[in-house]
Amino acid sequence: MQKKRLLSGVKPTGRPHIGNYFGAIKQFVDLQDEYESFVLVADYHALTTLHSQKNPAEVRESIKDVARTYLAAGIDPNKTTLFQQSMIHEHTELAWIFECLTTMPYLMRAHAFKDAEAKNKEITVGTFNYPMLMAADILMYNPDIVPVGKDQQQHVEYARDTAEKFNNLYGETFKVPEHIILEGVATVPGIDGQKMSKSYNNTIPLFGTKDEISKAVMGIVTDSGGGRPENVYQIHKLFRAEDELDALYTEKEGNYKELKEALAEDIEVIVAPMREKYQSITYEELTMVLKQGAEKAREHAATKMVDVRQRVGVTI
């Protein structure tokens, strides 16, 4: 029986953190035996930020960093097609076609645009059109499911709407995918209690040294009014079963320092083997994996675009 197909990816911006791992990457690893998996390094999406525009060398390093992270976390290139978005030129071509079918009011509903507008930021066309490139990334490979964090759910909804609109205009072309969000880790809290995010500077680095992780954990904001430090607990339950945690937090009630130390130790148990693997992956190994992944992804993309071009009328 043919496996169903999965697609997802991560934008290469900065050091990976445990929110990236539990919110997305771990899902890819856990599902790669069950699904035919396509995982992309979404490097073109990174160019929407001013920081990336000013630091092309850093973008290149982030691409390698994210790909190495996938492999260190357990992605098997023999089971998962891991590739770099920009190596498949069909993505931007399909995005343009989708943009020609999409209205401005529809894109103005996007969270990223509304957030930038609310903060009175100068908004690039790339930021505004972001959902259509995301839709192209997704729909190009006819996935059945798209694992995402809660904050990315809207992008899958945009992709679904776009697939249905194209199919209604030109005939059945794209599969309408479903999103999946792993309950309990849809949003990973940061050390300040907000969603863990590089933009909030509240992360625990996934491949940080033992001392870096310990320092981040000791900096978790706690509520002095309760016996159980809730921010610590919410992160801790990602690393240990809740029945064990409840016993520990009852025993150490009010002793925030010991509870944070226990969390740091539990993180180290999970992270240390991945960190060792991360450091062992050579540049040659990395580029070979991305090259092979791109070759496989390009076969699918090229076939899909032959059909799309024919349907929209640009093939004569």
Image (cartoon, rainbow, N blue to C red):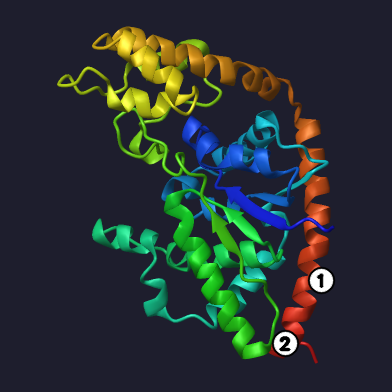
Residue drawn at point x = 65 percent, y = 72 percent: 94
| Label 2 Cα crowd, 10 Å radius (few <14 / some 14-19 / many 20+) | some
Question: How far from the left and from the top, in percent, is residue 169?
Answer: 61, 89
- In the picture, which quadrant includes the N terminus? bottom right
Q: Vertically, is 313 above or below 306?
A: below
Q: Secondary structure at mark 1?
A: helix
Question: How far from the left and from the top, in percent, is residue 134?
Answer: 56, 62
Q: Seen in the image, is 48 located left or right of residue 313?
A: left
Q: Secondary structure at mark 2?
A: helix
| Label 1 Cα crowd, 10 Å radius (few <14 / some 14-19 / many 20+) | few
Question: How far from the left and from the top, in percent, is residue 184?
Answer: 45, 39
Q: Seen in the image, is 223 located left or right of residue 299?
A: left
Residue drawn at point x = 52 percent, y = 20 percent: 208
Q: Vertically, is 191 above or below 58?
A: above
Q: Nearer the viewer, residue 287 or 254?
A: 254
Q: Seen in the image, is 90 located left or right of residue 261?
A: right
Q: Vertically, is 270 above or below 106?
A: above
Q: Quadrant of residue 276?
A: top right
> Can you identify the residue that label 2 sits on?
311
- In the picture, which quadrant includes the C terminus? bottom right
Residue drawn at point x = 56 percent, y = 23 percent: 207
> Can you identify the residue that label 1 sits on?
303
Q: Amino acid at mark 1?
A: Thr
Identify the mark nearer the N-term, 1 or 2: 1
Q: Nearer the viewer, residue 127 or 278?
A: 278
Q: Amino acid at mark 2?
A: Arg
Q: CA distance from mark 1 to mark 2?
A: 13 Å
Q: Does the rendering let one see residue 49?
A: no
**What is the number of the mark on residue 171?**
none
